């Protein structure tokens, strides 16, 4: 699948799940990136080339690392990562993110839609769960 086909596939998936690709396009993304609202979070979605594969990348910042109890926090993140399917928790400096990478080659349109919807649900649930146990500043979207 070419990058242009990948962009079209993700754009169609966004429309199907009720997100307008044009109004949610990221500036300077060349049409290959969107800010997709979830219930309480935002997914940054891009389509890119990775070693000849067209890849869907999703990153959702959910909260800052807690100011204390870092060892239990890291243990919790590792435990959660061992249970997650299709996504993982990662750190970008001191920001905890839910990330997902999926090759688009051969992926059915309904699977692309499912990846986007699942990432939003995971992002919201992980944000709530981690914040309840390790209160810190959260990234969230109202409404």
Image (spheres, rainbow, N blue to C red):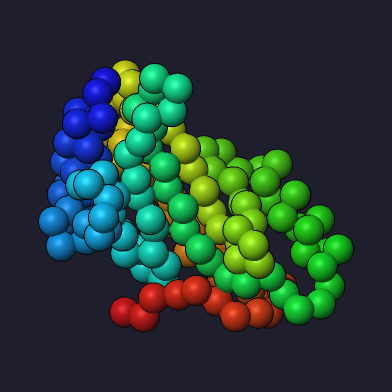
Q: Residue at x 39, y 20 (%)?
A: 52
Residue at the limit of the structure toward the front, as seen here: 28
- Horizontal side of 88 relative to 36 (left or right) equals right
Residue 123 position within the rendered picture, expressed as x and y whole percent measured from the top left? 49, 59
Closest to the observer, 142 or 32? 32
Number of marks present in the image shown: 0
The residue located at (42%, 67%) in the rendering is 41
Residue 61 rendering spot, x and y as whole percentages: 51, 63
Q: Quadrant of residue 22?
A: bottom left
- Name the spot of residue 111 as percent of width and height, x first: 32, 33
Which quarter of the rendering shows the N terminus? top left
Who's the residue at 52% across and 38% down the image? Answer: 86
Q: Is residue 77 left or right of residue 72?
A: left
Look at the picture and state if 55 lies above or below 77: above
Residue beneath the point at 35% across and 36% down: 48
Q: Is residue 16 left or right of residue 102?
A: left
Quadrant (top left, top right, bottom left, bottom right) of the C terminus: bottom left
Rendered position, 71 above or below 140: above
Q: Quadrant of residue 109?
A: top left
Q: Is residue 42 above or below residue 69?
A: above
Is residue 109 visible in this depiction of the protein? no
x, y percent for residue 28? 26, 55
């Amino acid at each position: 699948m070419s990058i242009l086909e990948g962009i079209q596939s993700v754009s169609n998936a966004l429309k199907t799940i009720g997100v307008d690709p044009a109004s949610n396009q990221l500036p300077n993304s060349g049409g290959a990136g969107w800010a997709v609202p979830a219930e309480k979070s935002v997914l940054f979605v891009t389509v890119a080339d990775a070693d000849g594969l067209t890849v869907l990348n999703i990153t959702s910042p959910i909260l800052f690392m807690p100011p204390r109890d870092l060892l239990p926090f890291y243990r919790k993140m590792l435990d959660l990562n061992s249970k997650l399917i299709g996504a993982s928790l990662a750190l970008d400096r001191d920001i905890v993110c839910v990330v997902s990478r999926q090759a688009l080659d051969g992926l059915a349109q309904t699977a692309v839609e499912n990846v986007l919807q699942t990432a939003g649900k995971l992002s919201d649930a992980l944000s709530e769960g981690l914040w309840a146990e390790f209160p810190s500043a959260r990234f969230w979207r109202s409404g």
